[in-house]
Image: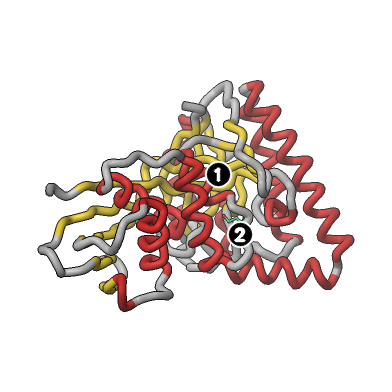
Amino acid sequence: RLPVEASACGKVILLGEHAVVYGRPALAAPVCGLRARARAEPLPPGAGCWIEAPDTGERLRLSEAPDHPLARTVRLALEHLGLPEPDLRLVLRSELPVAGGLGSSAAASAALVRALFRWADRTPEPEIVSALVYEIEKLHHGTPSGIDNTVIAYERPIRFVRGRPPVLLRIARPFTLVIADSGVPSPTRETVAAVRAGWEREPARYEALFDAIADLVQEAEACLQAGAIEALGPLLDANHRILQELGVSSPLLDHLVEAARMAGALGAKLTGGGRGGNVIALVRPEDVEVVTRALRAAGARGAFATEVRAD
Ligand code: MEV
């Protein structure tokens, strides 16, 4: 048999992170240019199933790593396919920063799931990929809303409400984001736990902040449907301010967001769990260069542009 390959995209939360854990809607888009890739290569009979992640130096045997998230992913996919442990080498590589708010864990799981389905000559529906990856996300993140696995499985911009099927976003005009990495890893599990602690301390205040985010999400969806891209900028800024109040920004993230705005971005915010990870800046196409440069000068490890479109 010949080796097979599969991949999965990264993602950005446009608006609504954290509030989405508490039942509010959020908007998310795939980042098609940053991907996790899995390759499945046949091994001689009896060799067993091996998972390798050269980026992190990990190499594990499926049968000897019961609790490792990558092994759990493979086992879940095999169970779904009704297959016993195959003689297979699975190699996982990723362009996504780990704990960077761009969905690295969900993308890795999705790439592995797709590679195993392809190996079995099957094509999984997005909802199957999403459901399998969600099981693994719960191991990584504790109480995830399910938005990461959903947007990555569908690879389309979505409006997401926890526990419901996603709604594909109508986007009248494509728009450009610059994504910039603070270089500070920040596991989502920790920021989600920090927000939960705040919510338990001051439930009324946090619920009001989540409601304010939900209003912004609704306005942003209307802007996207109308092609009113310029009007989206202030909504991103307002969402960032609420995330500051929720305690999930950081001086560096605030500095990056401010630098993007000063350089001409229409709006900017942190994306994902926060405290570290990435920021997004909404830019006119002609301002990509100057905003990218400003973000790098302000301390971003990397900054690149991506286009968000409906198809
Ligand atoms: C992570 O991409 C988004 C959060 O809202 C967590 C979640 O929804 O599971 C911070």
Ligand 1's image quarter is bottom right
- Residue 162 position in % (x across, y down): 67, 49
Residue 60 placement, left or right of 129: left
Residue at the spot of label 1: 281
Asked whether mark 2 lies closer than 8 Å to ligand 1, one says yes
Q: CA distance from mark 2 to mark 1?
A: 25 Å
Q: Nearer the viewer, residue 44 or 194?
A: 44
Q: Quadrant of residue 92?
A: bottom left
- Horizontal and vertical percent for residue 251? 62, 66
Left or right, 61 with respect to 203, comes to left
Dot 1: few (<14), some (14–19), or many (≥20) neighbours within 10 Å? many
Seen in the picture, residue 220 relative to 101 is either above or below; the reply is above
Residue at screen point 70% across, 48% down: 239
Q: Does residue 24 appear anywhere in the picture?
A: yes
Q: Residue at x 53, y 46 (%)?
A: 150
Q: Secondary structure at mark 1?
A: strand
Disc 2 marks which amino acid?
Pro
Mark 2 surroundings within 10 Å by alpha-carbon count, few (fewer than 14), some (14 through 19), many (20 or more): many
Label 2's element? loop
- Camera-side residue of 310 and 1: 1
Q: Residue at x 46, y 26 (%)?
A: 311
Viewer-side residue, 273 vs 60: 60
Q: Which mark is residue 144?
A: 2
